[in-house]
Image (cartoon, rainbow, N blue to C red):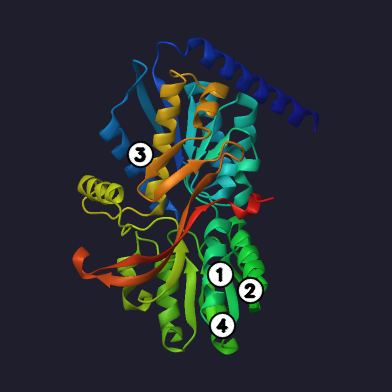
Amino acid sequence: MNSKRLVLKATLGLLAAACGATVGAADTGPIKIGLILPMTGQSASTGRQIDAAVKLWMAQNGNKIAGRTVEVILKDDGAVPDQTKRIAQEMIVTDKVAVIAGFGITPTALATAPLATQSKTPLVVMAAATSSITEASPYIVRTSFTLPQVTISIADWAAKNKIKKVITLVADYGPGFDAEKFFDSQFRLNGGQILDKLRTPLRAPDFAPVLQKVADAKPDALFVFLPSGQGAAFMKQFAERGLDKSGIRLIATGDVTDDDQLNDMGDVALGVVNSHHYSAAHPSATNKKFVEAFQAANKGMRPNFMAVGGYDGMRVIYKALEASKGAGGDALLAAMKGQIFESPRGPVLIDGQTRDIVQDVYIRKVERVPAMGNGLYNVEFDVIKAVKDPGKAK
């Protein structure tokens, strides 16, 4: 126990020293942004999308702020929290970064939160979506979304559209718990009934056993949350079990009908109603320009909600660095709070109190869009404006 305390004290001492050194030496050298993403492993699609969005932002906006060069240091954590924490510590102590961004899944963001607090280094969460993340450190800012934001919206829609009995199916980790909890409470508040609550492992899930339970129970609908990257495998097994022809409706958060994989899912995805904060088909001029530029820079790859979280994250970082004249720490954090801007997803606000994102949430249906190459897209047909995270609502 004593040796562990000594190691912790030494680590905290290094972090404090690094923070002081950064403030003292920050006037002339490069401004460094640490970017920690899962570039390999099951969550690699998240890393690929965010990395591409970060590069696009810099290509469009340059690499100079307050007369200093901006450097992005990208490190792969494979979505392994211990790796994330080790990389973050190296970035703070050795690289002396002004800010760390990325964080593909919730456990990686939570593992790094204490380091942010001790070193006063802002963390910009571009992907992870558990409501409580921003409460883990006063230095965490989020530009992605929260599961309660998008889950309550689809629960309301289901209750208004003659869906009375539902089974929920979520991934067995933080965002899944949020999705399960908030769908359950909102759906039952509107008079609905939850027949069962099913969970699948975060890593290497097999959906067949849980889908058989759904087939046997015959609910009106199955509500699903799965992390980005698992949707195609789920849809394949949903069709293989014949559930697409069973009369059981599939409703979901937009992670399941992820733009990055949607065309690979085929016709089984057609008609799936879901709620989310971003679609590549969002009909705004800002988004059309973003999608066109993203695809041109990435051999036609379609941007998804992870890409927009990364793109907007860089916007928040750049504007804050400009306002703080390149300073890090509390000055940089203060300049991130309260930012209001037009994102490819629509209007957004970084809440000054919660440091979380406030944004529109859209109800969408998967359709083929002839005007967009006859590809599958999440086509928006309703919107809930300026949604705060219900997980923090008083």
User: Which type of secondary structure does the marked residue at label 3 adopt?
Assistant: helix
The residue labelled by disc 1 is: 156
Of the two numbered discs 4 and 3 on the same chain, state the one appearing first in sequence: 3
**Label 2 vs label 4, nearer the camera:** 2
The kind of residue on which mark 1 rests is: Asp
- Report the residue that reaches farthest toward the front: 385
**Mark number displayed over residue 54:** 3
Q: Residue 105 location in percent, x, y?
A: 52, 50
Callout 1: 10 Å neighbours few (<14), some, many (20+)?
Answer: some
- Answer above or below: position of 298 versus 25: below
Residue behind mark 4: 214
Residue ID for mark 2: 190
- Quick check: 282 above or below 140? below
Q: Position of residue 304 (x, y in %)?
A: 36, 54
Q: Nearer the viewer, residue 13 or 141?
A: 141
User: What's the residue at 53%, 35% (across, down)?
Assistant: 123
Disc 2 vs disc 1: Cβ atoms closer than 8 Å?
Answer: yes
Which of these two is toward me, 32 or 89? 32
Residue at the location (44% across, 31% down)? 317
Residue depth check, mark 2 versus mark 3: number of the one nearer the observer: 2
Sequence-wise, the earlier of marks 2 and 1 is 1
